[in-house]
Image: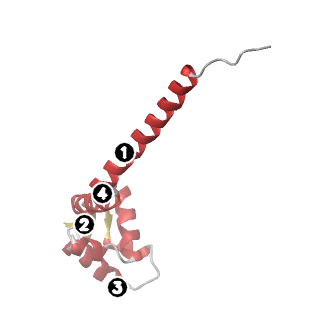
């Protein structure tokens, strides 16, 4: 998970992943999208490949890269656990709801049992 987080920390690599989300692309097609050198793009692709976020295959003289989403799922699961309320927070929220419900019921019950004012 650390390699994945490190790999997506760079904006160029995140852009490459977005490009590959649409379709597999050759290294040249990816490099044409950026104003950085082809060797720099190759280094970004190597980082993504080593993190397991892309796979590559030879297609004639070209290398074609494809997105691999499984490593992102593990990171997304961890982020989701971090953003979900903790166990205690969930219980406290439920307690707050119960307190408000009980108060509302008591006010309603008190209003029904209050004697009617006599009209003169």
The residue under the point 35% across, 51% down is 92
Which is more N-terminal, label 2 or label 4?
2
Residue 69, given in percent of the width and then of the height, sits at 26, 58
SS at mark 1 in the image: helix
The residue under the point 33% across, 64% down is 25
- Mark pair 3, 2: CA separation: 16 Å
Query: How dense is the environment of label 4, judged by Cα within 10 Å: few (below 14), some, or many (20 and up)?
Result: few
The residue under the point 33% across, 72% down is 8
* Residues at circles 4 and 1 in contact by the CB criterion of under 8 Å: no
Query: How dense is the environment of label 3, judged by Cα within 10 Å: few (below 14), some, or many (20 and up)?
Result: few
Which is more N-terminal, label 2 or label 3?
3
Query: How dense is the environment of label 1, judged by Cα within 10 Å: few (below 14), some, or many (20 and up)?
Result: few
Q: Which residue is mark 2?
A: 54
Q: Which residue is mark 1?
A: 95
Residue 40, disc: 3
* Residues at circles 3 and 2 in contact by the CB criterion of under 8 Å: no
* Mark 3 or 1: the one toward you: 1
Note whether 99 is above or below 51 in the view shown. above
Nearest the viewer among 102 and 59 is 102
Q: Which residue is mark 4?
A: 86
Residue 115, given in percent of the width and then of the height, sits at 61, 19
Nearest the viewer among 49 and 31 is 49
Which is more N-terminal, label 1 or label 2?
2
Residue 106, given in percent of the width and then of the height, sits at 48, 31
């Amino acid at each position: 998970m650390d390699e994945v987080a490190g790999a997506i920390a760079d904006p160029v690599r995140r852009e490459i992943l977005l490009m590959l989300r649409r379709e597999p692309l050759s290294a040249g097609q990816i490099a044409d999208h950026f104003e950085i050198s082809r060797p720099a793009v190759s280094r970004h692709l190597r980082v993504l490949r080593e993190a397991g976020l892309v796979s590559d295959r030879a297609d004639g003289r070209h290398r074609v890269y494809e997105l691999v989403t499984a490593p992102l799922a593990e990171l997304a699961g961890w982020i989701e656990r971090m953003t979900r309320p903790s166990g205690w927070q969930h219980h406290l929220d439920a307690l707050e709801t119960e307190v408000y419900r009980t108060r509302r019921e008591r006010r309603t019950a008190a209003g029904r049992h209050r004697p009617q004012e006599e009209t003169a």
